[in-house]
Amino acid sequence: MNLKQILIGSALVALLAFGARCSRDPLRTELPFGSTDLTAVDAQLARLEAEDRARVEAYVKRSNGDYLPAGMGDPDMPFTARTFAEAIELEKQWEARMAQEAVAQQGRDAERERALAPLRQIVSADIVRAAIEPGSGAAHASGSAAKRVASPDRGSPERMRLTLRIRNRSAEDVVQLAGTLRARDRDQPLSLSLCYFEISAQQPLKAHEVREFDCLQQRAISEQERAFVAGAPGRFTVEWLPRELTLAGGRRLQSNVY
């Protein structure tokens, strides 16, 4: 065997060894196209580090198994991965973006809470009872000029009744008040609008007065509303969002939070 044959043989051995390593590298595993079912690549997933395995699974769930070439789809949320390695890299980028967004959201939430705090110190609002009951006639509210979140559907067989408790914590009458009660939903990105209401000078909230009234919505009841009324443990957090109020002495406060 001459030198040339030895060199060619060595190169072939090296190439075969490289190919074998590549075939064993789970990062080169191709993602299933058009499916979120990873059963076919379970063995390769099992060979990944736990964090990378979770990233592949999260990417496939987020992309719904889709593949979009570069330049197509949302540039801030590309689904261009073909392999585990590419999916892991894109998921790392997504995690970094979500971390930045979380920091920004914390800042927005803090600013929002600062705007609401002066009004909340004067008036508090809570829900003391919630029920879904058979509907009869047009929706209305008693005890105050409360308004529905949505227009009534007279054909609806049901209505949601919320009993609100409004408390004036100040030593001065509140002659005008507008605000909304919302519920943040742990399981849904959109919060649930519960009741928007107003109090006018014709029915002022006296100093230190506590008043209860009903807010009724007669329309199709959503599954989210049913879960709220049922009291799904830990799912909903009720927020009082006072928009504006005026005291008898003329002082007016606005939060500009809707």
Image (cartoon, rainbow, N blue to C red):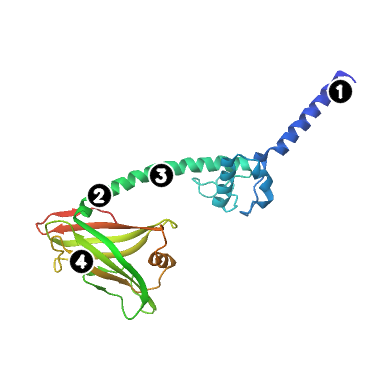
Above or below, 230 against 68 in this view is below
Q: Residue furthest front?
A: 233
Along the polypeptide, which appears first: circle 2 or circle 4?
Answer: 2
Quadrant housing the C terminus: bottom left
Q: Residue furthest bottom?
A: 136
Q: What residue is disc 1 on?
A: 5
Along the polypeptide, which appears first: circle 1 or circle 2?
Answer: 1
Along the polypeptide, which appears first: circle 1 or circle 4?
Answer: 1
Q: Residues within 10 Å of mark 1 (few under 14, many from 20)?
A: few
Q: What residue is disc 4 on?
A: 211
Amino acid type, label 4: Arg
| Image coordinates for residue 169, horizontal then vertical, percent | 17, 57
Label 1 element class? helix
Q: What residue is disc 3 on?
A: 102
Q: What whole-number distance in Å separates the C-alpha atoms at marks 2 and 4?
A: 24 Å
| Image coordinates for residue 42, horizontal then vertical, percent | 66, 48
Along the polypeptide, which appears first: circle 4 or circle 3?
Answer: 3
Amino acid type, label 3: Ala
Label 2 element class? helix
For residue 115, which numbered disc appears in the image?
A: 2
Residue drawn at x 21%, y 51% is 118
Where residue 19 sits, quadrant-wise, is: top right
Residue drawn at x 15%, y 68% is 203
Label 3 element class? helix
